[in-house]
Image (cartoon, rainbow, N blue to C red):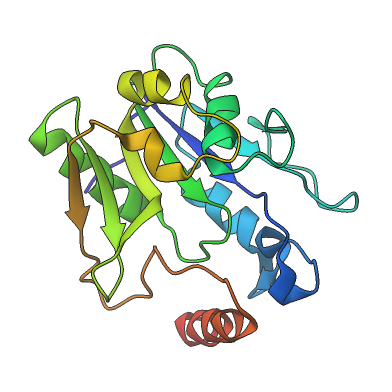
Amino acid sequence: MGELPSDFAAILLVGGKARRFAGCAKSELVVEGTTILERVLAACGGAAARVVVGTRPADAAALPAGAVQVLEDPPGSGPARSVRTGLEHVPDDCSRVAVLAGDLPFLSPEALRLLIDTANAVGPESGAVFCDNAGRRQWLCGVWPAAPLRRNAAEVEPGAPARLLFTGIDVETVVWEDASPPPWFDCDTPQDLDQARSWAADLK
């Protein structure tokens, strides 16, 4: 599929209470020796900007060079407001923005390239998201046109759901057909984490 374009940015959302993990941040869970956040950041390594939004543990590892961490305004106000805050750190010349959960251990540059290519094939004002095996759109695993995303983000109130960010944007649904673990797979439960670790061990 080629390299990722230089005019896209990535916003990674790491907020949330992670109650099923006794308060441990899901993005800081380890899969094959690497935190999930580190894996997501590596997948977005070609982005013009990588913005991590949300609170991280005080003892979390430093972010790689070029990535920044910010806190949503107001704190704890949900994913839509987190994206709004993240967009303040996205360069104006970025035409596309990936909006990603911070607990996607199998996101890859190839998956992002597929999303970008799918959106571009429809038009510059279109977005693309992965859907899971049940056909549900994974709103926090997608790529969006920057301008309408900024317009929508400017209107969201604290507590608003993420889907309001995408109002009025044509969206293409993408199915991951590769045999490798799906990029949309997130670690919401301990069982999900066990599955991710099993898959990752098999890939060694």
**Outermost left residue:** 122
Residue 90 visible (yes or no): yes
Please state the horizontal and vertical placement of residue 23, each as a whole percent of the image: 80, 66
Please state if 173 lies on the left or on the right of 14 as rendered: left
Residue 3 spot, x, y in % from top left: 31, 40
Compared with residue 148, is residue 77 higher up or lower down, i.e. above or below? below
Q: How many marks?
A: 0
In the image, 107: left or right of 122?
A: right
> Residue at the location (27% across, 76% down)?
133
Q: Which of 157 and 101 is in front in this view?
A: 157
Taking the spot 58% from the left edge, 21% from the top edge, the residue there is 89
Tell which residue pokes out farthest to the top in this image. Answer: 92
Q: As drawn, is 133 to the left or to the right of 36?
A: left
- Is residue 4 among the parts visible in the rendering? no
* Residue at x 31%, y 69% (from the top left corner): 132
Residue at 84% from the left image edge and 52% from the top image edge = 57
Residue at the far right: name it.
58
- The percent coordinates of residue 44 (x first, y second) are 48, 44
Q: Which of 204 and 145 is in front in this view?
A: 145
> Which quadrant would residue 180 be assigned to in this image?
bottom left
Residue 159 is situated, as x and y percent measured from the top left of the image, at 59, 41
